[in-house]
Image (cartoon, helix red, strand yellow):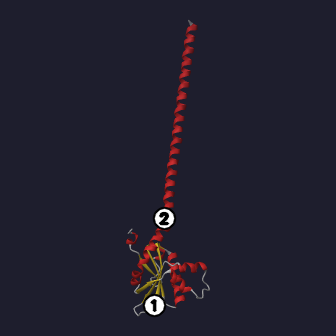
Amino acid sequence: MATLESRVRRLEDAYDNLATKDDLERFATKEDLADLEERMTARMATKEDLEQLATKNEVNQLRVDFGPIKAAYVSDKAKSEGPFIAQDMGFDYVRTLNPVDMFALTRGQDLSGISRGDLRSFHRADLIIQVTDSQGQESYIAVEMSYTADERDTTRAVRNAEYLERFTGRPAKAAVAGLRRDRRIEDIGLDEVFWYELPESILEVE
């Protein structure tokens, strides 16, 4: 009888030990699952972050790529604004100089002190307008154009106006034109550089 009871107790102990082992395995499985779930969540979050970053970078790259195209389009369309710019500055419009005219201005001139890059930039000026004042005196307006006018436009316009006076012996004014303007040029006096706001209509596709 004692032997039978001993065997029963051993079986009961074995069952208890087995149950404990099963419980531990279940707990371990739960912990593993929780850990796996956490890692998967982190990986998915990282993937989403990378996808968002990639999308953001693509958008920024598109802006960078589109910037020069937009500026070139605005500059080309704005060249027809010559008469309006002249009138706003108190002059009568005469004509817009083309590249051939620009080369003619410098032909045979003393170019000392002018770098090759600056001379090329002058020949490629966005807009040079020949005008007359109320007394009929001939003068010029050097205009630089951008979607958003900035300090570089101002610097080029002032430089081109100085070159015009040097090459023609006539007075010349500097102007910048754009749909927007950088804050850094808002404080520039109108006596030095004239600001002309381009109309939004130039962006319309005909």
Query: Farthest front residue?
Result: 100
Task: Say what amino acid the circle numbered 1 marks.
Answer: Glu
Q: Work out how far the residue at label 1 is from the one at label 2, CA to CA, in angstroms.
A: 39 Å
Q: Quadrant of residue 115?
A: bottom right
Residue found 41% across the figure and 75% down from its top: 198
Q: What element carries label 1?
A: strand
Q: Can residue 18 be seen in this view?
A: yes
Using the image, tell me which numbered label, if any, was put on residue 90.
none
Residue 18 horizontal/vertical position (percent): 55, 21
Say which residue label 1 marks. 138
Is residue 134 left or right of 155 when viewed as pictured?
left
**Amino acid on which the number 2 mark rests in the picture:** Phe
Give residue 102's position: percent from left, percent from top: 52, 83
Q: Is residue 1 left or right of residue 147?
A: right
Q: Is residue 98 above or below residue 138?
A: above
Labelled disc at residue 66: 2
Dot 1, crowdedness within 10 Å: few (<14), some or many (≥20)?
A: some
Residue at (53% x, 38% y) in the render: 36
Q: 53 or 76: which is nearer to us? A: 76
Identify which residue, 144 or 127, lies in the foreground.
127
Above or below residue 50? Residue 196 is below
Rendering coords of residue 111 (x, y %): 60, 86
Query: Which residue is the extreme one toward the bottom?
Result: 135
Q: What element carries label 2?
A: helix
Examine the rendering and report whether any part of residue 181 can be seen. Answer: no
